[in-house]
Amino acid sequence: GAGVSQTPSNKVTEKGKYVELRCDPISGHTALYWYRQSLGQGPEFLIYFQGTGAADDSGLPNDRFFAVRPEGSVSTLKIQRTERGDSAVYLCASSPGPDNEQFFGPGTRLTVL
Amino acid sequence: GQNIDQPTEMTATEGAIVQINCTYQTSGFNGLFWYQQHAGEAPTFLSYNVLDGLEEKGRFSSFLSRSKGYSYLLLKELQMKDSASYLCAPLDSNYQLIWGAGTKLIIKP
């Protein structure tokens, strides 16, 4: 594809609900990253996939957060029992490898009411 | 611990030159990236330095000193569209980007 795409662009949900955020990386990129970003802050690392496996999930804040990449391409970030503090822009990035530049998607703005 | 230090905000005049400094401490080092982020948009890649010295790319240049844990981004011939946040992000020993809060650059006519 032309670039990294993310859906939805905006998601408003109620506290306690479950949400799924999708990331479609650049074709052929084996590395995929999830970040979240709050206003005025840099991206906060959540999880890194190399192929289908989570190479580093140390950034996931707690067990309500989970991400998958079953076929080594599209990835889904899943958040259970959402809390107001989860409100942020969730960014996905992909790269050909871990020491290459990361290409970012436009992000999903999640608002938990 | 891992730490990035950049000025929170800088102001410069259209047509001028500005230097954004970054000092970092990381567990291992595999190069340093600079990204630009316009308000409400995703970060976009500007430069990557892995060896000491200056890398020039058009109006933008980036410098690295590994021994000092220091980098800077130099922007020349500033344009209004350069108003954005600039994020310094070193790559640690696990090949993870370590992000600071970035420097918000305001360009005035």
Image (cartoon, rainbow, N blue to C red):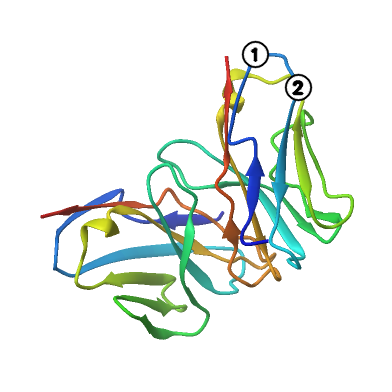
| Residues at marks 2 and 1, CA–CA distance in whole angstroms | 9 Å
Instruction: Tell me if B106 is positioned left or right of A93 in this view.
Output: left
Tag 1, which chain?
A
Mark 2 neighbour class, 10 Å CA radius: few under 14, some 14 to 19, many 20 or more: some
Q: Quadrant of residue B28?
A: bottom right
Residue position for label 2: A18
| Residue A86 place in picture, x, y as percent | 61, 27
| Residue type, label 2 | Tyr
Q: How many marks?
A: 2
- Secondary structure beneath disc 1? loop
Q: Are marks 2 and 1 on the same chain?
A: yes
B108 lies left or right of B30: left
Give the SS element for disc 2: loop
Figure check: A28 above or below A12? below
Q: Residue at x 44, y 85 (%)?
A: B52
Query: For this view, does B106 lie left or right of residue A48?
Result: left
Q: In the image, what residue occupies the spot 49% across and 50% down?
A: B42
Front-most of residues A49 and A108? A108
Residue in the picture at 40% in, 86% down: B53
Drawn side of residue A110 relative to residue A46, left or right: left
Residue picked out by circle 1: A14
| As drawn, A104 above or below A59 | below
Task: Name the residue rendered at 41%, 78% in the picture.
Answer: B64
